[in-house]
Image: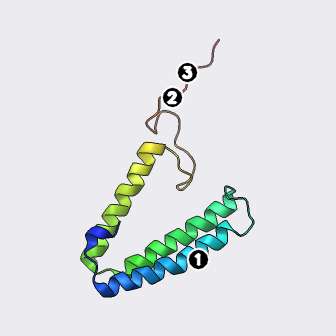
């Protein structure tokens, strides 16, 4: 995601430090003993990932931030189109609104 942003050597080093720090946090969540797919674990992991992206964004200059924001928006849009509800953005959309056909009406 960051390869097209033309990061300086200093930015690359800062981003690597951020990634390493958050990788440790994510690993500790994964290995923490909680069920990996329970809502609390997902929320904690999502919070770590959101903070990581925020910290990385803070390293970028304004032009890079715009490109980063655009890439994040496109990624979110692709995720919504290809998987419908991914568990990250609230409840799933109503049937028929996530690219899948609505279920057939109940038999009478």
Q: Position of residue 59 (x, y in %)?
A: 36, 82
Q: Can you say whether 30 is above or below 97 in the image?
A: below
Q: In the rendering, which numbered label is found on residue 104?
A: 3
**Residue at (56% x, 53% y) in the render:** 90
Q: Residue under circle 1?
A: 24
Q: Quadrant of the C terminus?
A: top right
Q: Is residue 79 left or right of residue 88?
A: left
Q: Is residue 106 left or right of residue 82?
A: right
Q: In the rendering, which numbered label is found on residue 51?
A: none
Q: Residue under circle 2?
A: 102
Distance from the alpha carbon under mark 2 to that under mark 1: 42 Å
Q: Can you say whether 29 is above or below 93 in the image?
A: below
* First reached walking from the N terminus: tag 2 or tag 1: 1
Distance from the alpha carbon under mark 3 to that under mark 2: 6 Å
- As drawn, the residue found furthest toward the bottom would be 10
Q: Position of residue 7 (x, y in %)?
A: 28, 78
- Secondary structure beneath dot 1 equals helix
* First reached walking from the N terminus: tag 1 or tag 3: 1
Residue 1 sits in quarter: bottom left
**Residue at (38% x, 85% y) in the render:** 13
């Amino acid at each position: 995601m960051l390869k097209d942003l033309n990061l300086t050597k200093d930015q690359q080093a800062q981003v690597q430090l951020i990634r390493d720090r958050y990788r440790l946090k994510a690993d500790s969540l994964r290995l923490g003993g909680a069920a990996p797919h329970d809502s609390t674990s997902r929320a904690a992991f999502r919070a770590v990932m959101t903070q990581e992206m925020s910290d990385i964004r803070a390293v970028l200059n304004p032009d890079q931030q715009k490109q980063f924001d655009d890439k994040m928006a496109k990624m979110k849009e692709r995720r919504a189109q290809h998987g419908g509800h991914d568990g990250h953005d609230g409840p799933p959309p109503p049937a028929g609104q996530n690219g899948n056909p609505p279920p057939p009406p109940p038999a009478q």
